[in-house]
Amino acid sequence: MIDNKRSKRLKSLLYTVLGIGLVIGLWQLMALLLDQPVIFPPAASILSSLWQGLTDGSLLLRTGYSLRLILIGMGLSVLLAVLLSLLSMLIRPFAKLSHILISALDPLPGIALLPVAILWFDLGEKPLLFVMVHSILWPMLLNILNGFASVPVIYDEVGRSIGLKGFHLIRSVYVPASIPSILAGFRTGWSRAWRALLSSEMVYGVIGNRGGLGWDIYSKKVYLDMPGMFATLIVIMLIGIFIEKALFDNIERVTVKKWGMRI
Amino acid sequence: MKKVFVFLLILSLCSLLTACGEQEDPDSPASLYLAVQYGMQYAPVYVMQELGLLEEALPGVELQWSNLGGGSAMNEALISGSLDVAFMGIPPVLIAIDKGADYRISCGICVPPAQLMVRADSGITQLSDISEQQRIAVPSITSIQHIMLAMACQKQLGDAHALDENLVAMTNPDAYIALSSGSQVAGHFASMPYIAYEQADGFVSILDAEDCLGSGASIVCVTTPEVAENEQLHNALLDCLQEAISLINARDEQVLQIIAEREHITLEEVETYLDWEGSLYASEVYSLTELGEFMAEYGYLSKDFAGFSSVTWETAVEGQPSDAQDAE
């Protein structure tokens, strides 16, 4: 049984290494065919730039800065989403208001609010957090409310028949039954947070030279440091894969998969 | 079946990427792709455009105009092969050539005024007064304003990168609003007409192009080798730009009207801004060598600057600061 598991893991690792190798090989081939290093830098120069950025600490500093802001933004958004969804469940007219807010504000791109955010909060981290919370909150709230709405009536009736009501009913019946939808909301919020932060930094560079990965891409772009720019993009992709595998997959494993809600 | 699908997917991706690298033949005399930016410093270009000078000089050549928002976008368009002629500041051109781009400067079009404006109540009278929290807005990193500020930092503070942490990249209108709203933006390295707007609002100048460079720096016309090698095309372009510059300098009424309409300002404002101290419309290229040497010495370029002729076509004439002062 253990051997079987280990061989499965080895196989998965082998496929990952082969996949990465194939992508690098294809990239190098394209770079050789095109022979335009500024447009399509060779894989070797991208990897060398990535290595340099990691060893001199510059990429790690930028990554740390971006991750810190994203975690604060996610934290604030989760708090607000939980609060609004609880209010929506407990007070019916509030649910209608939440849906109107979602319909009106969710389609509004965060970057469009950045000029307003700068006027309201001045430069620095506050306008970035405002844009991020706006980008994360509405899809997250929508997913939570949709999850609650799709809970079968019989679950609600069973909960009530054993004496649960109000907050206890939501915590013990609605939340566990809506976990797949809530998780989808977290995933969307996470990717929206990245997009909001990177685009804000790239468009306005509102935090000067002390910025995160968006500022890093912006400054490398203006200096035509294409290998460096691709290296930063690789870091962003790696963080995405890591969070997906280490966080979301594990939460899914100990919740929805364990409870038999999803295969 | 799955393997065949994956193979086809990779194959189509490869062909797509190859297609991305294909460029239209820029040597084709049938069309010429030109891009300009916004602002009065580009007046010779849009005067040439409005008067149809280039169409007259190059019958049969279809002119495709576009507006791009900065030197970085110009570099990307030139490198990707979607542009033949671009009008931009000197530093982004030097960075692109340093990275291996094959385009060069054909001529100058204008030396615009540039001033670092600060709020009168900010307590800033020189660069050393700028605190860690105060921000200086420049149109973008590697813009001429950014490099001029670095030159002034080197002169006044002994460190070209002393204010790097204070920089914020904002367009002129956004920086004007930020400066006016009493935000952390305490200074704006502005160009016309924002210098005039900010001066009228009580902001004061603590630094100008002359303090940084000795004279202003040119906005230049950049052309690809295909254009420069096509003598008829290249000469026609340079002659038309020179004609537009001469008309601006002669304060031709029709030309003043064109500028007023383009900039949404009155004729009086046009004349005021054209006569502004430090403003010069000329085809000579000013301050290129000074900028190149500074940028190479302080790490903005990766290689040594090999001189004026290494980044220009033969048509470019180096302007002397004394000539600029006489012309003003």
Image (cartoon, rainbow, N blue to C red):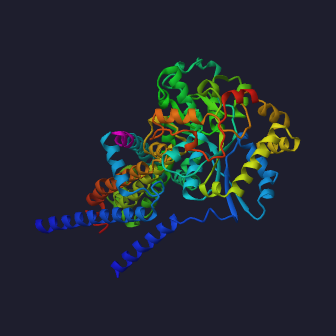
Magenta region includes residue A68: no
Residue most extreme to the bottom: B1
The residue that appears at 47% across and 22% down in the rendered structure is: B158
Image location of residue B204, percent across then percent down: 67, 22
Which span of residues is magenta-colored?
A57-64
Q: Nearer the viewer, residue A88 or A192?
A: A192
Image location of residue A204, percent across then percent down: 55, 41
Residue most extreme to the right: B253
A100 sits left or right of B303 in the view: right
Magenta part, dominant SS: helix
A25 sits left or right of B298 in the view: left
Count of labels shown?
0
Residue B146 in view (yes/no): no
Up-down: is B4 above or below B286? Answer: below
Question: Could you tell me which quadrant the C terminus of chain A lies in?
Answer: bottom left
A145 sits left or right of A1 in the view: right
Q: Nearer the viewer, residue B247 or A110?
A: B247
Q: Nearer the viewer, residue A67 or B42?
A: B42
The residue that appears at 72% across and 49% down in the rendered structure is: B238
Magenta region includes residue A58: yes
Question: Could you tell me which quadrant the N terminus of chain A lies in?
Answer: bottom left
Based on the displayed image, in which of its 4 quarters is residue B116 positioned?
Answer: top right
Q: Nearer the viewer, residue B61 or B37?
A: B61
Residue B67 in view (yes/no): yes
Image location of residue A160, percent across then percent down: 36, 58
Based on the displayed image, in which of its 4 quarters is residue A173 positioned?
Answer: bottom left
Image location of residue B63, percent across then percent down: 72, 59
